[in-house]
Image: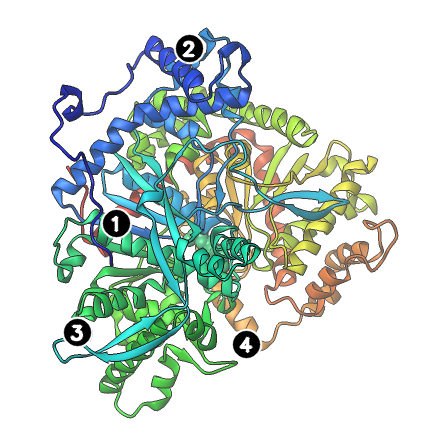
Amino acid sequence: VSGHRTLGPTSTPTHPLATAPVGMPAHSVDGFVREFLHELNTNQGVALSRSSANDQYLALASTVRNYLMARWLETSRRTREAKAKTIGYLSAEYLLGRQLGNALLATDLNEIAEKGLALCGLDLVTLRNQEVEPGLGNGGLGRLAACFIDSLATMDVPCIGYGIRYEYGIFRQTFVDGRQVEETDTWLALGSPWEFPHPEASVQVDFGGHTERYVDADGEERTRWVPSWNVLGVPYNYMVPGYLNGRVNTLRLWSAQATKAFDLQIFNAGDYAQAVRAQTFAENISKVLYPEDSTPQGKELRLQQQYFFVACSLRDFIDNELEEGFDLHNLADRITYQLNDTHPVIAVPELMRLLIDVRGFSWDEAWEVTSKCFNYTCHTLLPEALEVWSTELLGRLLPRHLEIVYRINDQFLAEVDKTFPGDGLRTRRMSIISEYPERGVRMAYLATVAAGKVNGVAALHSQLLRDKVLPDFSELWPDKFTNVTNGVTPRRFVKLANPKLSDLITDAIGPGWLTNLERLKELEPYADDPEFKASFAAVKASNKQRLTALLKTRDDIDLPDGHLLDVMVKRLHEYKRQSLKLLHIVSLYEQVLSGKLPASALTPRTVVFGAKAAPGYRMAKDTIHLINKVAMKVNSAPEVEGRLKVAFPANYNVTLAEKLIPAADLSEQISLAGMEASGTGNMKFALNGALTIGTDDGANVEIRQLVGDKHFFLFGMDEPAVTELGAKGYHPGAYYESNPQLRATLDLILSGHFSDGDPHAFDSVVFNLLHQDRFMALADFQSYVDTQALVEQRYADQDAWTRSAILNVARTGYFSSDRSMRDYLQRIWHTSPML
Ligand code: B1H
């Protein structure tokens, strides 16, 4: 570990401004306009009259940034001075969404900006729409990280978010003939006004090579890692502003660059082209986000990414955040690292290596510190989602780390043997090293062994984690396991996304609820207030109009008026069962087509899908194709015109979610019970006054408990029933044989009706549902369509529906990520806000 960088002036500053706190532009329309024009002229180098919308957006972003700057620098100074304990959130993904709106909200500048820009002849909304969202995550896991850092800043908790500055974030999805086609996400192309690169603070990260034993000056036997190549990690800092509280935390994302030494070697060999290629090789590490959600890729580059950002992040904190001479034996007093799933778990052997090989700690001293510094959040139950790195790859890329992992395992298994003497089966089950299908490191086990606390992300998930995924570990260390139910930030997902609802809430219960979301409870009495109900319904209608306008321009989709808006947005995965929603649509359509049901009996309904499939996930892509083909047919069928419509806008992302969710009536949360760890979309919908149709899965369980059975449409098998059916043997064909409507539905797809007469176009999807399907869609079909009928009954009584919708808002304040952060602080991090 290199020493501390020399910082600050080289002689004592004498100018009065040099020691004064940083200034801030005046919080007035005039001050804002002055700052904005200054930025436009000096940063963009254009006159207002010659400026493009992009120039204007970039200048606006810099302007808002300038209002945050003093607070950012002050936050950093105060935190250092107080030597406060910091949360080091380690996450391979941050799905941030657009920054401008949130920054305006956090600084209370929205109105001032609107007025100031209008005086310049500009429109704030237009400029906000210029922003390309940083999509540095796949789905729920990455968005959760973004919500958590927002909440910590708002709650005055010191936190540094550490991650990767992917040059290309999650791919942009387009449809060609109904099939998903991926395009690269060039989010940096038009400028990146929210980031601050610090190349001078770059960190070198080593890879490859071998290890050697040697005896040091004190006669101690020690190990040295002799790596064979390295790259530089360049930090890019982003502001994470708290809501109106003056705190601005930091998100530090690392970008990979070739090191000089690397080039020089090859230059000296006289091969210029090879040197340039080497540069590209190094820079590949942070080039692109892996687009798999739930099924990690065991690719070498992925492991390089993981080690890269984690090594940079540990070094960064020790070298640059701690004061010089800090005794690392006390590291846990100053930082607690939260491992966001197993992606950053290589941090565990990395900290051991730093302490032992670089700082001269004994093994036991190093383990004492390391085991106090980490906690681990698991986000899954799917066995295929648990990362296992082959020892061949790990040994080749990080030979010293593999040695350390082996030793951690030896010590751990000795402890197991002490507690359960002679139980060889148990030690084999619990080993961090797996032997089949190849020898590998089970990252979830490594994380569990090293962590002070291990948590799941919803009550049911945490229970299943203890009982099914890590039963031996929870037997050994019952107190290590805990639950923290996920949450979402109400600043982005209520206030920014749904300003009209927010105003209505404030009118009713007064201000303050945005940072104390349990106060939404005070809305309960308004569920029976006719005037409030009318206003609430009017807000929903207005949000639908806003969505209609957006989808028209964004996707050339026409949303009909007055429909029940039924929304299923999330990554495409078999366990989430978009196919079940699809079967419901086809079933309704088939009944009308075949004359079993008059079209007039259908509740006018528009189903909106939003979903990206991992590019290599065939079944998911075929499902997207089928949805699009069904949509084309249904939308042009005169038989169901005005009654049934399917919309699938491409490229679902945070920006679209902010418009879609507030407009929804019905939230589809229909995963097979026991499969969705938590879900967070489910929370966003409920908080925006949609009713949920869902299985007893993930956080649905808690949503239903809180809003009450009457205001939640539960269907399907619960987790024990799923397990029982699995044990008995799931035979989907039996449902097809015994359920005429299900048969008619599948037969219509198999007839080629949706595929221009080609009966085989959707064989993969349909045959899977009929013969395989680990996720048992057909088993829940009847229950699902029956429950959808109950949805329609309730919707027919608009007054009752609105009442339920209001109660959903009033009773889901629990799902603020502020509450999640409080739970982490109390149960896991054992620290409190800085006052
Ligand atoms: C969740 C992932 C995930 N769980 C691997 N696991 C990935 C796994 O790139 N990879 O390899 C990426 C993502 N994501 C989600 O986390 C759960 O499915 C949701 O139920 C949960 O709400 C969310 C946040 O906890």
**502 sits left or right of 802 in the view:** left
Q: Which mark lies nearer to you, 3 or 1?
A: 3
Secondary structure of the residue carrying tag 1 is strand
Closer-to-camera residue (38/442): 38
Q: Indicate the position of residue 479 as horizontal and vertical percent values.
A: 24, 67
Residue topped by disc 3: 362
Of marks 4 and 3, which one's residue comes earlier in the chain?
3
Secondary structure of the residue carrying tag 3 is loop
Whether the residues at callouts 4 and 3 have beta carbons within 8 Å, the answer is no
User: Dot 2: within a 10 Å radius of its alpha carbon, few (fewer than 14), some, or many (20 or more) residues?
Assistant: many
**322 sits left or right of 657 in the view:** left
Give the answer, above or below, for where 800 lies relative to 430.
above
Residue topped by disc 4: 727
Residue topped by disc 1: 87
Closer-to-camera residue (771/3): 3
Distance from disc 4 to disc 2, alpha carbons, whole Å, reads 65 Å
Distance from disc 2 to disc 3, alpha carbons, whole Å, reads 63 Å
Distance from disc 4 to disc 1, alpha carbons, whole Å, reads 43 Å
Secondary structure of the residue carrying tag 4 is helix
User: Dot 1: within a 10 Å radius of its alpha carbon, few (fewer than 14), some, or many (20 or more) residues?
Assistant: many
Of marks 3 and 1, which one's residue comes earlier in the chain?
1
Q: Which mark lies nearer to you, 2 or 3?
A: 3
Secondary structure of the residue carrying tag 2 is helix
Mark 1 belongs to which amino acid? Ile
Residue topped by disc 2: 115
